Image (cartoon, coloured by chain):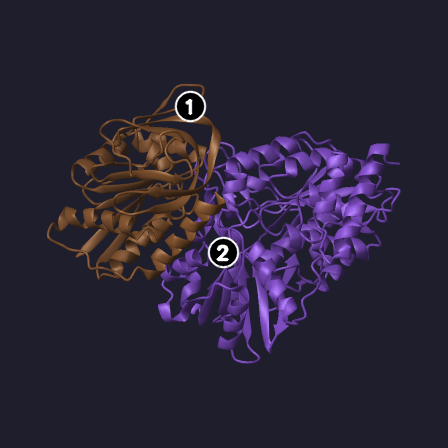
């Protein structure tokens, strides 16, 4: 039973939540902030009462999708997850998710905490939440005005994970040297996932890389295969550090326009049909592997987990589609070079020539520094683009990026107003065709709000 | 006519999108019909001092900066110095800028020697300067995004690139930003800097081309998009920094 302070915090947070929802707002953060102001240990106190414990999902890219996959898996197993599913992933988002599922006497209406955690907040969050399982999907450069340098961030996360009790299981991406090195600093159970399909990835290291050096001895890494940036089949010829053995491994990944199929290796691979991942892109195959590895860490049955994945639906801006004026808008949230490259990889895998609506903003949630667009591989995208309508608070920077990537000026148009930009992008696409919307976080929010007002079927904020 | 660009330590000094500067130099040359070759120069490789017309040296993580500092203390550093004496230009940002100065003085421990082709010295500061940076200069305004904890102070041989209008610049004290000495430029402007500050890109291109083609002239380009991006970023720097 939570203590008196947590009860008051719960009540204050819930009042805020009721107020916001009465006025039609999403309430994904502010109620949490109120509760945390009253009781800084609110999330620790409440999550300690959950029978199946807590799992945290973190990393630069894929945490929202991975956490949602894991939510579906645990629900299929009969659990009742409390989940910050909107992707509001700072402490206040975790607190807000708990508030949405507690009674006024602070008793949770779920039995499992599933929290997506911002990677910069992970060190403090794991101390408070004492999770059973911590999943780290990958670590790429992201919003450096907020997180600063990747090496420093990896060290902080490593320090925090090293301080966790021995019964916490880590679920880590073996193909990411920075992530897999997190395990080597502590003596506890770790489940590694990775891709072992020789046809996935190439031999040439990509230009934009965050970790070309060994995380232990700082010598250059050698790659047999590079999947994306520094992710791949890596080893250090100097100190001998190498990609750890994969507990959940894909021996074959078949990519398609609306999803992919994964063949799992080893004993589990012999038992089950291929895993169907119903959203496209290699990076979503990785997310599925992370979710399956997490299910294993939680001692859940894999057959059920695979069935749950097959009916998965994507989250806000993660390749969801919206019908608008007879066109299909495919929403792709982009926020850093690795995520952008993975997203355009998924777009181009199937030989599309996309009509784009691209939006760049520089609010805190987008990252105030827009420099990252110059690290993203627009040069790979530009030759295929049919037409790009550009908008956002920093749309002029984005237009310049397309111009310098070689997109012909007549295929490029800047429209500052959100609604006008949507109208223009829609008008340029023939009826029945698709418009790919690439946008940063607050730009995507703004575009979705306009679409909702215009009568498009936009799923509610939290779903 | 051709242009040779050397990209210094692209594998280590490559964060904050600084490679956009190389893209800008290359494209602005190609759009004028000038052939371009870009060569990466990294740790342990022999940097041929005769080849490049212009060097680009970006910012990196602390780890990268240590490795690069050690490499520049050897013959690659001597080669870079010789190249500057031979008329090549350098554009450097953030960590690269600091390593072209005399030294970097950390809070504790021995100072890290730099190349000394810029008469500047950098000391570690406690508070990190993170935000939009707007600068004015007699040649035109410059805008970008700064993200550094080092404080850089100019000696008498280096001239500031401009005066800070919004943000912190070199050290947050004397309102200067960047340094120019001969054909060597250093600054704290990420963004990337050169795409939306086209006058500076063309200044560097002019210097670079002049090394082997002293009579060549750069044709003007249509910079409408570049100036629109600069205006939008400048407005953000003035109102939201």
Q: Where is residue A176? Give x, y as percent.
A: 55, 45
Task: Name the chain under label 2.
Answer: A
Furthest residue toward left: B215
Say which residue appears at 64% left-offset and 60% top-offset.
A262
Q: How many marks?
A: 2
Secondary structure under the numbered disc 1 in the rendered image? loop
Q: Where is residue A402? Give x, y as percent.
A: 40, 61
Residue A37 visible in the displayed image:
yes
The part of the image, by quadrant, that contains residue A407 is: bottom left
Q: Are marks 2 and 1 on the same chain?
A: no
Neighbor class of circle 1 (other Cα within 10 Å; few <14, some 14-19, many 20+) is some
Q: Nearer the viewer, residue A415 or B123?
A: A415
Colour of the chain lettered B: brown
Q: Nearer the viewer, residue A197 or A408?
A: A408
In this figure, which residue is indicated by the disc labeled 1?
A: B106
In this figure, which residue is indicated by the disc labeled 2?
A: A393
Q: Give the quadrant of the N terminus of chain B.
A: bottom left
* Chain letter for the purple part: A
Furthest residue toward bottom: A431
Q: Is residue A48 left or right of residue A215?
A: right
Say which residue appears at 53% left-offset and 72% top-offset.
A423
């Amino acid at each position: 039973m939570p203590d008196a302070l947590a009860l008051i915090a719960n009540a204050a947070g819930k009042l805020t939540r009721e107020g916001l929802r009465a006025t039609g707002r999403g309430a994904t953060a502010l109620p949490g902030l109120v509760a945390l102001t009253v009781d800084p240990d609110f999330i620790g106190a409440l999550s300690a009462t959950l029978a199946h414990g807590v799992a945290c999902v973190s990393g630069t890219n894929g945490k929202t999708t991975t956490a949602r996959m894991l939510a579906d898996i645990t629900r299929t197993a009969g659990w009742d997850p409390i989940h910050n599913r909107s992707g509001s992933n700072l402490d206040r988002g975790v607190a807000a998710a708990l508030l949405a599922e507690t009674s006024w006497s602070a008793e949770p209406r779920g039995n499992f905490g599933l929290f997506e955690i911002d990677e910069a907040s992970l060190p403090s969050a794991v101390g408070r939440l004492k999770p059973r399982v911590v999943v780290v999907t990958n670590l790429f450069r992201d919003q450096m005005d907020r997180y600063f340098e990747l090496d420093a961030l990896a060290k902080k996360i490593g320090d925090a994970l090293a301080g966790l009790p021995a019964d916490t299981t880590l679920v880590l991406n073996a193909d990411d040297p920075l992530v897999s090195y997190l395990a080597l600093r502590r003596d506890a159970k770790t489940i590694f996932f990775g891709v072992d399909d020789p046809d996935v990835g190439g031999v040439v290291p990509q230009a934009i890389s965050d970790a070309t050096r060994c995380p232990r001895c700082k010598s250059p890494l050698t790659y047999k295969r590079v999947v994306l940036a520094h992710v791949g089949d890596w080893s250090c010829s100097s100190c001998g550090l190498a990609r750890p053995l994969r507990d959940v491994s894909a021996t074959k990944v078949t990519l398609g326009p609306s999803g992919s199929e994964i063949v799992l290796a080893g004993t589990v691979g012999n038992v089950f049909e291929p895993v169907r991942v119903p959203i496209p892109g290699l990076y979503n195959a990785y997310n599925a592997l992370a979710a399956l590895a997490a299910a294993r860490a939680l001692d859940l049955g894999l057959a059920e987990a695979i069935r749950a994945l097959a009916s998965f639906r994507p989250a806000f801006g993660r390749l969801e589609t919206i019908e608008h004026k007879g066109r299909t808008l495919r929403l792709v949230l982009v926020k850093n070079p690795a995520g952008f490259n993975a997203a355009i990889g998924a777009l181009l895998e199937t030989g599309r020539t996309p009509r784009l609506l691209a939006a760049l903003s520089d609010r805190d949630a987008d990252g105030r520094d827009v420099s990252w667009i110059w690290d993203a591989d627009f040069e790979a995208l530009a030759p295929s683009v049919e037409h790009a309508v550009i908008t956002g608070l920093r749309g002029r920077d984005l237009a310049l990026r397309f111009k310098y990537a070689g997109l012909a000026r007549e295929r490029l148009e800047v429209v500052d107003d959100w609604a006008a930009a949507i109208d223009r992008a829609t008008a340029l696409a023939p009826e029945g065709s698709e418009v790919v919307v690439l946008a940063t976080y607050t730009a995507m929010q703004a575009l979705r709000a306009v679409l909702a007002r215009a009568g498009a079927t936009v799923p509610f904020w939290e779903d | 006519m051709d242009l040779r660009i050397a990209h210094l330590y692209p594998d280590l000094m490559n964060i904050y999108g600084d490679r956009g500067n190389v893209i800008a130099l290359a494209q602005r040359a190609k759009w004028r019909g000038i052939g371009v070759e870009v060569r990466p120069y990294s740790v342990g490789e022999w940097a041929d001092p005769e080849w490049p017309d212009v060097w680009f040296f970006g910012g990196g993580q602390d780890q990268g900066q240590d490795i690069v500092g050690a490499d520049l203390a050897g013959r690659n550093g001597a080669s870079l110095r010789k190249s500057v004496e031979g008329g090549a230009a350098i554009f450097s940002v953030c960590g690269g800028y600091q390593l072209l100065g005399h030294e970097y003085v950390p809070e504790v421990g021995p100072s890290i020697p730099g190349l000394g082709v810029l008469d500047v010295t950098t000391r570690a500061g406690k508070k990190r300067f993170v935000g939009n940076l707007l600068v004015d200069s007699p040649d035109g305004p410059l805008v970008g995004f700064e993200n550094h904890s080092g404080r850089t102070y100019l000696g008498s041989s280096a001239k500031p690139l401009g005066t800070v209008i919004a943000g912190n610049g070199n050290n947050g004290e004397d309102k200067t930003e960047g340094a120019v000495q001969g054909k060597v430029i250093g600054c704290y402007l990420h963004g990337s800097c050169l795409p939306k500050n086209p006058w500076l890109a063309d200044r560097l291109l002019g210097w670079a081309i002049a090394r082997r083609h002293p009579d060549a002239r750069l044709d003007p380009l249509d910079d409408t998009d570049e100036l629109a991006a600069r205006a939008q970023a400048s407005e953000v720097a003035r109102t939201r920094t």
